[in-house]
Image (spheres, rainbow, N blue to C red):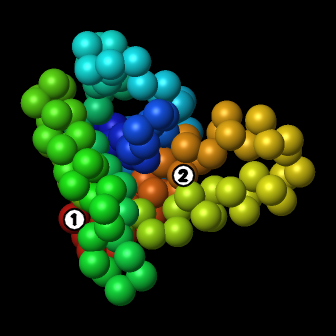
Amino acid sequence: MGRIAGVDFGNVRIGVAISDPGHSIASPWKNLTRRGDAHDAEVFRRLVAEEQIELFVVGLPVHCDGRESKLSQQVRSFAAWLKKETAVPVVFFDERFTSVEAEELLLSADLSRKARKARRDMLAAQILLASYLQWRRANDDG
């Protein structure tokens, strides 16, 4: 069984987390500093090959009432690009409050601003992926 990758999209950095092969645990993988489509595509293709990624879960930013945000279209475009570059299916999952939760966890760990910044995106991706895995188990899709 392959792994699932959670992706927290950003214009500067993309946070990535991966599941275990049994889809029970989400762990932070890395923050990808964006360097252009060719470089980014190579990083994601390498991730797919090395970690046997079978699905990408991309966080979709929505407002509290469920309406999509301005960033949602950029995320949808990124997800289409990711699927084209890796040939791996992509699903969207509500990312409401993942970045806020990540920041609160990092603040409670009493980390410096620089240390928080270095971890925030991949921690948000981990929270997103953990939520997706829990939802998937509850809905018996996996």
First in sequence: mark 1 or mark 2? 2
What's the CA distance linking mark 1 and mark 2? Answer: 23 Å
* Circle 1: residue type: Asp
Instruction: Say which quarter of the image contains residue 96.
Output: bottom left
Which residue bears the numbered disc 2? 124
3 in relation to 136, above or below: above
| Residue 86 locus on image (x, y percent) | 18, 26
Instruction: Say which quarter of the image contains residue 36.
Output: top left
20 in relation to 129, above or below: above
Between 36 and 111, the residue placed more toward the observer is 36
- Quarter of the figure with the C terminus: bottom left
Residue sitting at 48 percent across and 48 percent down? 125
Which residue of the protein is positioned furthest toward the right in this rendering? 110
Between 73 and 53, the residue placed more toward the observer is 73
Q: Residues within 10 Å of mark 2 (few under 14, many from 20)?
A: many
**Mark 1 against mark 2, which lies toward the viewer?**
2
Q: Which mark is residue 141?
A: 1
